[in-house]
Image: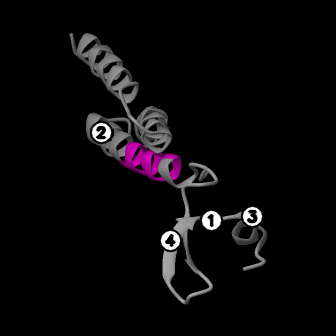
């Protein structure tokens, strides 16, 4: 019975991870899913009981979500940079190649 609940929880988590809006959210959800599974396996191998399995799964899910979110590549055009026009007015616009090449 517990095995069926575990499978149902994994399937529901996978289904909800597919509902994420942005690439960063999708990567965080996938990282949490993979990290949670890996953490559960490591927790079970080290502790051999339910408590260590749950702690390993929670730790792995948290670490996987953080790593998945942090490794999301940033697309060009999303970064906004301040510019000054010839009249001295400051405005923001998407960063150009000078920003990405370090020539700013």
**Marks 3 and 2, the one that precedes in the sequence:** 2
Marks 3/4 in contact by CB < 8 Å: the verdict is no
- First in sequence: mark 1 vs mark 2: 2
**In which quarter of the view is residue 8 placed?**
top left
Q: Residues within 10 Å of mark 4 (few under 14, many from 20)?
A: few
Q: CA distance from mark 3 to mark 1?
A: 7 Å
Tell me the tag on residue 92: 4
Q: Which segment is the magenta one?
A: 59-68
Q: Residue 90 placed where, x, y %?
A: 50, 82
- What residue is shown at x 43% (from left), y 33% (from top)? 33
Crowding near pointer 1: few (<14 within 10 Å), some, many (20+)? some
Viewer-nearest of discs 3 and 4 = 4
Q: How far apart are the alpha carbons under marks 2 and 4?
A: 47 Å
Q: Which mark is residue 54?
A: 2
Identify the residue position indicated by label 3 in the image.
Answer: 97
SS category of the residue bearing label 1: loop
Q: Earlier in the sequence, mark 3 or mark 4?
A: 4
> Looking at the image, which is closer to me, 75 or 39?
75
- Residue 102: percent from the left, percent from the top? 76, 75
Q: Residue at x 28, y 34 (%)?
A: 50
Vertical relation: 17 (above or below) 77:
above
Residue 95 — which label?
1
Report, in whole angstroms, how far the alpha carbon at label 3 lies from the one at label 4.
15 Å
């Amino acid at each position: 019975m517990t095995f069926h609940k575990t499978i149902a929880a994994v399937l529901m988590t996978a289904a909800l991870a597919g509902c994420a809006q942005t690439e960063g959210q999708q990567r965080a959800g996938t990282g949490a899913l993979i990290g949670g599974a890996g953490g559960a396996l490591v927790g079970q191998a080290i502790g051999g009981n339910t408590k260590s399995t749950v702690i390993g799964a929670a730790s792995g899910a948290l670490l996987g979500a953080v790593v998945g979110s942090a490794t999301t590549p940033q697309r060009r055009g999303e970064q906004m940079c301040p510019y000054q026009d010839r009249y001295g007015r400051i405005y923001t616009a998407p960063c150009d190649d000078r920003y990405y090449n370090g020539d700013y």
